[in-house]
Amino acid sequence: MSSFPSQSTLASDFFQIGLVRRIENWLQTMPHPSVVVEIAEPYVAVARWAGKSGQLEELAVEPLPAGAVMPSTLETNVAQPESVRTALRRLFSRVSIAGVPVALIVPDLVVRVLILPFDNLPRRSREALPLLKWRLKKSVPFDVDETTISWMRQTGREGALEIVTAVSRQPIVREYETLIESLGGRVGVVLGSTLATLPLLKELGSTLLVRLCGRTLSTVVVSGESLCVYRSTEMRGDTGSIEPLGVLDEVFPAVAYYQDSWGASIDSVRLSGFGTREAAFGQALAEELKIPVVSMNDLATAQSLTGPARDLIPQGLDALAGWMMNARV
């Protein structure tokens, strides 16, 4: 999915044992560093945990100046590299990354996630990749030859084959990697923020995740074994200024698409990243969608995390927690 070895292309097959479990298994085929760094629009964060125990050993977070990171699929992302580097340097003075590879979490807008129907796709990577690139040329607004692509198979509507594909422009990914490397770090894995969060959902029927990070709103629908909807949008405001109506305008098309395409209803809604305004947004979504809304922090998976690790979620650091859940498989 949007996780891939630094500066390389990954193609993986997945077992038919459920979407989140397949994501977890897929990530387990990758290096799984004990240190994870997230570079987001409003902050940078680094966490270190102990093996598969879920024990958070160290955590440091630094805010970023407005405009330092401007997530985009196409344009330059790191507008103020020195500001970001300074914040990272402060982090690494508290949580050392010397001599160890790190997992790097990047903003959702860096990675395009597409759910592509296929009649058939070869399982050999060298045969599948050209076909995927050919399809992507019609779907992404950039040259697919300068991209990093990863994918997984899933069973879609009426048993059809679907390929969940994550694609990112290599020059943009390198902007983020270079920051880490300039401070003596080594990136082992790169992945998108919301996809790192999905293991917290497990499989809770048909679930709508509405996640805000900075000005990026990501809307995801997971149903049983399938990722049904994935869209990320740049909003006109951040957590402090965006209004519930603006979120509803983005969520409604995803809900309608899922209901029309899959002929099913969404069972529950999970909110993340709305901070002190979560109750207001949750109430608005519950009233309009007529669906129960639950905070990510109240999920059983979140409650299974130990001590400080559990506190990551109400702090808006659920991507770090999701990565920890992957490590515990």
Image (cartoon, grey):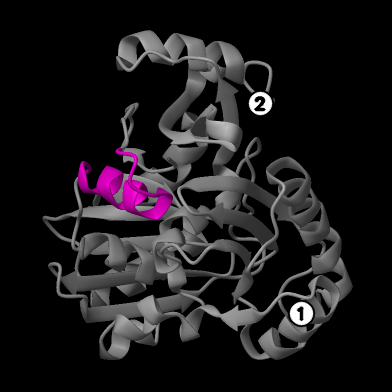
Work out whether residue 243 can be spotted: no
Q: Locate residue 202: give its quadrant.
A: bottom left
Relative to 87, residue 315 above or below: below
Position of the C terminus, as image quadrant, is: bottom left
Locate the N terminus by quadrant: top left
Q: Residue, x 15% and y 60% (percent of image)?
A: 98
Q: Residue at x 70, y 90 (%)?
A: 279
Q: In this orientation, which residue lies closer to the viewer: 108 or 281?
A: 281
User: What's the distance in space between the residues labelled 1 and 2, CA to CA?
Assistant: 34 Å
Q: Is residue 2 left or right of residue 90?
A: right
**Residue 185 seen:** yes
Q: Is residue 62 above or below residue 139?
A: below
Q: Which residues are magenta?
A: 15-30
Residue 57's x, y, as percent? 19, 80
Instruction: Name the disc covering residue 240, or none.
Output: none
Asked whether, in this view, residue 228 is left or right of residue 307, the answer is right
Where residue 75 sits in the image (x, y, percent)? Answer: 66, 38
Looking at this view, is 159 or 31 the one in front?
A: 159
Residue 297 image position (x, y, % from top left): 48, 84
Give the main secondary structure, helix, strand or loop, of the magenta stretch. Answer: helix
Residue lying at 55% horizontally and 70% vertically, measured from the top left: 64
Say the numbered circle drawn on residue 286: 1
Q: How far from the left and from the top, in percent, is residue 56?
A: 23, 80
Q: Amino acid at mark 1?
A: Ala
- Amino acid type of the residue tagged 2 in the rendering: Val
Q: Residues within 10 Å of mark 1 (few under 14, many from 20)?
A: some
Q: Is residue 286 magenta?
A: no
Residue linked to disc 2: 140
